[in-house]
Image (cartoon, grey):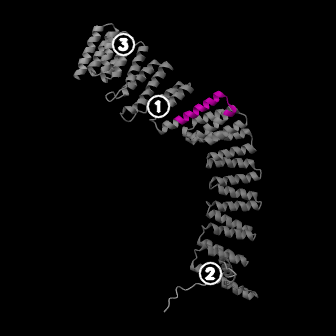
């Protein structure tokens, strides 16, 4: 048997007509079989019509017997009866449905629309009355009721429906709809009285502002001012926290439009003084814009001061131990305020925030607050007694057994020297050395005595210094330099020799 090798594949040419997938789908769609359709039924006479209606009614009734809680089925049944012009039957079906679920709002609306469409106005009014009596808190029924009465040009009836509605004290949009209705017929006095009732029920700032805008459009400037004044008095009587910045800002902008610049400025300032710091940011921005447009340099600086003060108030309220913020706040108060009590209040509030720990790093900025406070009392207010009290209270507060601040003792001593109380200054520095001896305290005390030319006291202080810190080369050198400065070279040489021997022994 001979090996013929692999079979040869014959080359086939492409078909002249190519069929795409899109063409296949389009032909399949065009040749699809028609879907089943409900056959059209033609009624030849009244008897066939009655038979058809009876059959359909039986179908609807059977469906309702299976599930009588299906309100949509009741509505479809009633709608079919309406198409058959059987209004009494449709009305009966609606009534039966209401017995099943009288709280279904769409059912009431479909029933009412059916009566209105067939011009049964009195029937519709009776239904409206029943609906709002049974469901007085459903605003949609009331809106439909008043819209129907107004469409029928029954303005007194519309007003009567609104009054019934308002007796339930609905939400603000309902009151505003009543007001808009009165405005359409030019009854501005009635609208004004409705606004007054609205602000009693809903005392929000937006309603007072809408009333003021109404008076601005239809009333007089006196009326506008009276509305704003009544708003602020009413809200302030309820408590300062109820005063709204939007009312104050709106009133001030209106006064500015009337070119009453001083009134507007007074309103802004009153609002900033009355409102809490956290609620006045927007009012600060509005006041800044006002002063830039109508104020002078002093007014602009005042509003900038108040704005920065509010920012510092927020910072220290969020973090009472933020002493950097307290420093900036105190500096701002000193530079911008002329009220001594206000500046003192800032310092008192600042120093009331004692650091919670006994770590010295937490106390440094805090102690400098006390020092700044004392310096301000001495130099700015010239109240020496209060400055002394600040120093003394601060010294009582520092836990000297753990740490102390030499600068505080020294500044207090300098303060007493300026007041001519040298003995008190020496006593304080002596107390400092006795309670918490530190090299800086010794140096400060020695420098004070050097300035006073009390060299014997300096010698005693150096002796005490070396008694406590015998291994301090700096103390030995300074003591020797003092003696050399006084011209006692032998004593200076002896101190130097003693220092070398002591330090060589490592004692």
- Magenta: main secondary structure equals helix
Mark linked to residue 449:
3
What element does badge 3 sit on? helix
Residue 295 covered by magenta stretch: yes
List the single residue furthest toward the top. Answer: 487
Q: Where is residue 52 in the image (x, y as percent from the top left)?
A: 70, 85
Kindly indicate whether the residue at mark 3 contacts the one at mark 1 (C-beta within 8 angstroms).
Answer: no
What element does badge 1 sit on? helix
Q: In which quarter of the image is residue 289?
A: top right
Q: Distance between the residues labelled 3 and 2?
A: 117 Å
Q: Which of 184 and 295 is in front in this view?
A: 295
* 238 to the left or right of 23: left
Please say if 43 is above or below 486. below
Q: Nearer the viewer, mark 3 or mark 2?
A: 3
Q: Which of 229 and 484 is in front in this view?
A: 484
Q: How far apart are marks 2 and 1 (CA)?
A: 81 Å
Q: Which of 292 and 490 is in front in this view?
A: 490
First of labels 2, 1 by sequence position: 2
The segment highlighted magenta reads: 292-312
List the single residue furthest toward the front. Answer: 2
Mark linked to residue 460:
none
């Amino acid at each position: 048997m001979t090996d013929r090798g692999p079979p040869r594949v014959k080359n086939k040419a492409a078909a002249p007509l190519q069929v795409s997938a899109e063409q296949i789908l389009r032909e399949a769609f065009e040749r699809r079989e028609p879907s089943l359709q409900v056959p059209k039924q033609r009624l030849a006479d009244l008897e066939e019509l009655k038979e058809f209606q009876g059959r359909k009614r039986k179908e609807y009734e059977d469906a309702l017997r299976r599930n009588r809680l299906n309100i949509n089925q009741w509505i479809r049944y009633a709608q079919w009866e309406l198409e058959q012009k059987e209004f009494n039957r449709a009305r009966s079906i609606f009534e039966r449905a209401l017995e099943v679920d009288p709280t279904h709002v769409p059912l009431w609306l479909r029933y009412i629309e059916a009566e209105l469409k067939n011009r049964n106005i009195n029937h519709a009014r009776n239904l409206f009355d029943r609906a709002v009596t049974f469901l007085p808190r459903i605003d949609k029924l009331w809106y439909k009721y008043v819209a129907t009465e107004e469409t029928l040009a029954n303005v007194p009836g519309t007003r009567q429906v609104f009054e019934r509605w308002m007796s339930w004290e609905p939400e603000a949009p309902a009151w505003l709809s009543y007001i808009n209705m009165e405005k359409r017929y030019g009854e501005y006095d009635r609208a004004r009285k409705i606004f007054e009732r609205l602000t009693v029920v809903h005392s929000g700032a937006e309603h007072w502002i809408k009333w003021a805008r109404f008076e601005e459009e239809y009333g007089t400037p006196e009326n506008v001012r009276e509305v704003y004044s009544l708003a602020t008095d009413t809200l302030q009587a309820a408590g300062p926290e109820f005063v709204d910045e939007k009312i104050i800002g709106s009133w001030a902008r209106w006064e500015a439009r009337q070119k009453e610049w001083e009134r507007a400025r007074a309103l802004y300032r009153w609002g900033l003084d009355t409102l809490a710091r956290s609620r006045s940011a927007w009012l600060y921005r509005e006041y800044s814009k006002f002063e830039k447009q109508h104020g002078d340099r002093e007014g602009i600086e005042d509003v900038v001061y108040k704005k920065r003060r509010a920012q510092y108030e927020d910072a220290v309220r969020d973090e009472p131990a933020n002493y950097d913020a307290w420093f900036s706040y105190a500096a701002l108060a000193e530079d911008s305020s002329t009220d001594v009590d206000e500046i003192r209040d800032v310092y008192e509030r600042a120093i009331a925030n004692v650091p919670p720990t006994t770590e010295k790093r937490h106390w440094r900025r805090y102690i400098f607050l006390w020092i700044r406070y004392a310096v301000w009392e001495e130099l700015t207010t010239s109240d020496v007694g209060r400055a002394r009290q600040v120093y003394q209270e601060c010294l009582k507060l520092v836990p000297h057994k753990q740490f102390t601040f030499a600068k505080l003792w020294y500044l207090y001593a300098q303060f007493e020297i300026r007041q001519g109380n040298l003995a008190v200054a020496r006593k304080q520095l002596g107390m400092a050395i006795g309670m918490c001896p530190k090299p800086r305290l010794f140096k400060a005390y020695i420098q004070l005595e050097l300035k006073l030319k009390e060299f014997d006291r300096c010698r005693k202080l150096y002796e005490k210094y070396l008694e406590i810190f015998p291994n301090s080369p700096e103390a030995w050198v300074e003591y020797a330099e003092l003696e050399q400065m006084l011209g006692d070279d032998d004593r200076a040489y002896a101190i130097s020799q003693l220092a070398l021997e002591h330090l060589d022994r490592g004692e």
